[in-house]
Amino acid sequence: PPRSTLFPYTTLFRSFDHLTYEHERIEHFLRDLDTSRYTDMQVVLKRETGVFSARMRMAAWKVNEREYLVLASLVDATHIERKRRDLLRKTLTIEQLSKSKKIRSGKLHDAIYEILEMSSKAVGVTRVSAWMFDEAHEHIECVGNYDTRMGKMIPQESLPVIEMPTYFMLFETEKIILATNAQTSPYTSELNDSYLVPNGIVSLMDIPLRSEGGIIGVICFEQVKQTRAWSLNDQKFGLIAAQMVSLAVETHKRKLAQQELEAALRQQKRLLSETNHRIVNNLKITSSLLNIQVGKARDSFHKNLMLDSVNRVQSILSLHEMLSDNSKTMRISLNQYVNRLVQSLRESLSFPQKQLQLLTSIDSCEVKSSLAIAIGVIINEAVLNSYKHAFADNEIGVIRIDFQMQGPKGVLEISDNGRGVKENRELSGSGIDIIRGMVEHLNGNLDIDGTNGMKICVSFSLR
């Protein structure tokens, strides 16, 4: 329509000095009635008591080619706007609590304070308190009671459960307890003498705190001196606040359990370290005493017996020395352990009449101490056997120790280029028996070949 036809409409709206509106949107709507059907906008109305928010809807119907019917309706939006702001305030509070470092850190007192303070402001209530059952479920103890009038936590004595049977029985079936007038409600009136009347509480909204399927306490929203009708948004927020408190309690318990576990682990590691040190010292004393006996031996037979014992003790000593250095993991490097053991064997088995080389090729890996002990004993016995039986005096020879990882298994091979054995019946003696016993302990497989030198092959699981 031409601009002249807008005059009655715009003049009409401007004649109401108590109405402010969006001039451009209204004029655009009236200029384009051919395509416009309706428009909504938020306006502010003035009255003697002040201004208030309203929602205005304009709708247009075509009467004939040049005439349109336009209707405008105004609805007081004060209540709607109040609900919108209330929902926004609660939503922002939930968002802030979900990001709270105090809740995630397990500091229960700080977390409870934050939840109760923010919840009281979000719901607009006088008091918010959190309660926890004692271990016997005979009393419910207040872990936090925030009062908006004082702006701080205030003390609150514990309450005996036995005096409130109906109230606590409700928690078994209800997710939330609502009372506009708590002092007359049949569900909460039994709290009058011990709690409601002394604190001037008129209305309450109580939500049970749950953890691992059981009720551990309750969070209470309390209005003092006046009644309060609890809206659906209030109830939804209360349920989320209860979950936040339960989360803070669970996080606190996990932190305490973790601290106890860490303390127990530290104690265990300390005791294990002390035990290893004592074992090392005792093994060194034993080795020294055996070495003294080696020097006192009157014949080569007894001297070799003592040397075998020294080497066996030394193989275990090498392991415990490495365990003392790796007490944090209780796993040791097999490569380092075998090389240390071999060096000890070189020093103790330096027979002048035998020129033997002791060579190693060990894949790098870490193994459990129990597995390392068995491997060390096998190596010790096999090398001792080669030193004593594979070579004649003044003979040059080589003893090899090889270890390879083959997936989840390990293959240990000790070989020499000595005389070997002609028949299996020659494969006897305490050393071979010890090797067989260790292989059985490992649930491994043993293969001995004496046709071209001596080769002892052991395969076993590394897990």
Image (tube, helix red, strand yellow):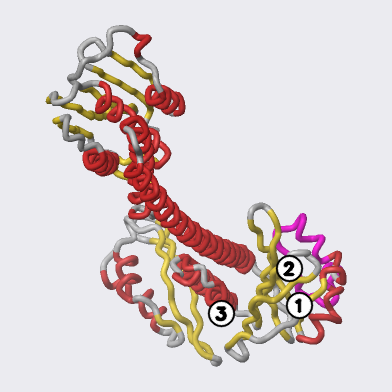
Which is more foreground, mark 2 or mark 3?
2
Residue 158: mark in rendering:
1
Q: Secondary structure at mark 2?
A: loop
Please, is residue 170 above or below residue 448 in the view? below
Task: Label the magenta part by its dominant secondary structure.
Answer: loop
Q: CA distance from mark 1 to mark 3?
A: 21 Å
Q: Foreground: 47 or 408?
A: 408
Query: Which mark sits nearer the N-terminus, 2 or 3?
Result: 3
Task: Please state the horizontal and vertical placement of residue 74, each as a whole percent of the image.
Answer: 51, 72
Kind of residue indicated by mark 3: Glu
Residue numbers of the magenta segment = 167-188
The residue that label 2 is drawn on is 134
Q: Secondary structure at mark 3?
A: helix
Q: CA distance from mark 1 to mark 2?
A: 10 Å
Q: Foreground: 364 or 253?
A: 364
Near mark 3 (Cα within 10 A), the count class, few <14, some 14-19 or many ≥20, is many
Residues at marks 1 and 2 touching, judged by CB atoms closer than 8 Å: yes
Q: Residue at x 37, y 33 (%)?
A: 302
Q: Residue at x 53, y 77 (%)?
A: 110
Which is more foreground, mark 1 or mark 3?
1
